[in-house]
Amino acid sequence: MKKTGNNRYRIGLMILTVYALLITLLVLAERDAENATITGVPNALWYSVTTLTTVGYGDTYPVTGTGKVIGFIFQMLSLGVLAALAGFLFRAFRTQLIPKFMLAAKRDRTWAVFSSDSDASLMLAGRLKEENPDDEILFALPKEETEADLPGMKLTASVPEVLHWQKGKGKSLVFCMDEDEYENRRLAQLLKNTAAEVYCLSGDEPDQIPDHQTYFNSASCMARMYWRKYPVLKPEETIILAGNGTGAEALLEQGLMVNVISPDQHIRYILSGDWSEFRRNHPYLSEAAAFGENTPADTLRFTEQPWNQDWEICRTADRIILCFETESENAAALSALRRYCPVGGKIYVRDHLMHENAVSFGSTEEIYTPELVMQRSLNRLAEALHGNYLAHNSGSLPDWNHLSEFLRRSNLASADHLYMKALILTGSGETPAESEMHELFRKAAERYRQLSEDEKDTCRRIEHMRWNRFHLLNNWQYAEVRNNQLRQHPLIRPFDSLSESDRAKDDYAWNLLEEAGHIV
């Protein structure tokens, strides 16, 4: 977008320079000629305007040879001026006046406004239109042309201008999805005092996010999608994660938070590549993975050696996840695995292309879905979970709208694990389709009601293990007195050392299974 703006600036400056040069030459050629009507800059400007607009009053005209040549140039340019004027008017009618007129009758509908026509925006817009055909899909692209086949209406206007057209009569959704994440954050900041629901594509988040705004990024969406679609369902599993960068880091962090299925589990994560920055940001990483009834519960093995250094591990691993930063790296790694190593487990490769004997994941189509981007079901589950907690602990915490950003994320993480809880209770060996989620939660809730007290105690241990992991991954530590600023909490300790009342708090997430079937 910036490059296009700079090019237009240069072209405009060049046109003005040529025009000024022609006016100067015209004055120099005509001012001393006999019977001259163009004797100064004002006359020359007037003559150029009447000629370029093809009005031609005839009150000023060149009399010299040089002047007539310049006049001929103006006459030829007048054709371009008319064409440009016609094009401008056509574009104005097509991208502003006509759409504005059409939208005036649809102000009471939901408007989904996109700030970009990227592949991700087009994919998400198409999905939204499929889910809600009556919604208006709008692309506010004031500074650039697009040749994309848009699943909605293009408007030559800024996002705030488009929202102003709606006059607050309907619901508005704004998707800040420019390639420049700084522009996305700037636009979200600009819209913080509006009533629009804002979804901002950004790897960074502000300290305080308004209630009506959601920040997301492709790495976290990809990680949530992967572990939701391919969860760990066995208490013992060996996982090789070969890769680097934000995608691989998001997969590991999300995996550690959702792959909590048994107090006696032992999941082995073998991580190759440069994880130094990630490990510096997570100083309690090993402690988080090992936090369980049996130590270590899970293990993390970081190695700077190439992922294919030890073929024996590749041969015995339950799954190998190839998640390098580029698809070409993933394709090369997959080719090497196929050619040189007999792999006993499943291979997952981050690639939009389908491969034989490997499961592809992470395509734009998989990642940019309304549920992953907008997180509506997840937010409703998290809010219901917090409401459940408040109902039994009145006065101890503020309501959802006044929670700190960390406590919101804590509830969201717990809600994210609810799907795994349903799989644990139902003993499902495979992930159900979206249309079957309601039935999954119904069966899980029914099974939970039938559990013995000892079985419910196991459920509490699983939830406490998950809760500890989330806090340790966010660099909280144990202390006798809670201190949010220093990230210290008295409950970061083994389950058996908790009081009965503190153990009971781990029931809240499991009790939400009943309500989850009506939310998802």
Image (cartoon, grey):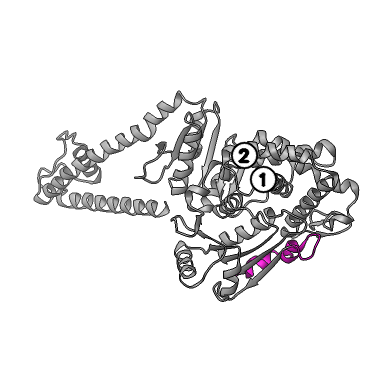
| Camera-nearest residue between 163 and 30 | 163
Residue 435's place in the image compared with 209, above or below, is above
Residue depicted at x 49% and y 59%: 358
Q: Is residue 197 left or right of residue 490?
A: left
User: In front here: 232 or 278?
Assistant: 232
Kindly give the residue lying farthest to the top in the view shown: 105
Q: Residues within 10 Å of mark 1 (few under 14, many from 20)?
A: many
Looking at the picture, how far across and down is residue 273, in whole percent? 58, 70
Among numbered discs 2 and 1, the one appearing first in the sequence: 1
Indicate whether 99 appears above or below 66: above
Q: Is residue 132 left or right of residue 289?
A: left
- Mark 1 secondary-structure assignment: helix
User: Disc 2 and disc 1: Cα gap in Å?
Assistant: 9 Å
What's under tag 2, amino acid-wise? Answer: Met
Give the residue at mark 1. Answer: 419
For the residue marked with disc 1, what is the amino acid? Tyr
Q: Is residue 295 magenta?
A: yes
Q: Residue 153 location in percent, x, y?
A: 41, 35
Q: Which residues are magenta?
A: 272-297
* Label 2 element class: helix
Instruction: Please report the residue visible at 84 percent of the width from the left and 37 percent of the height from the top.
Output: 392
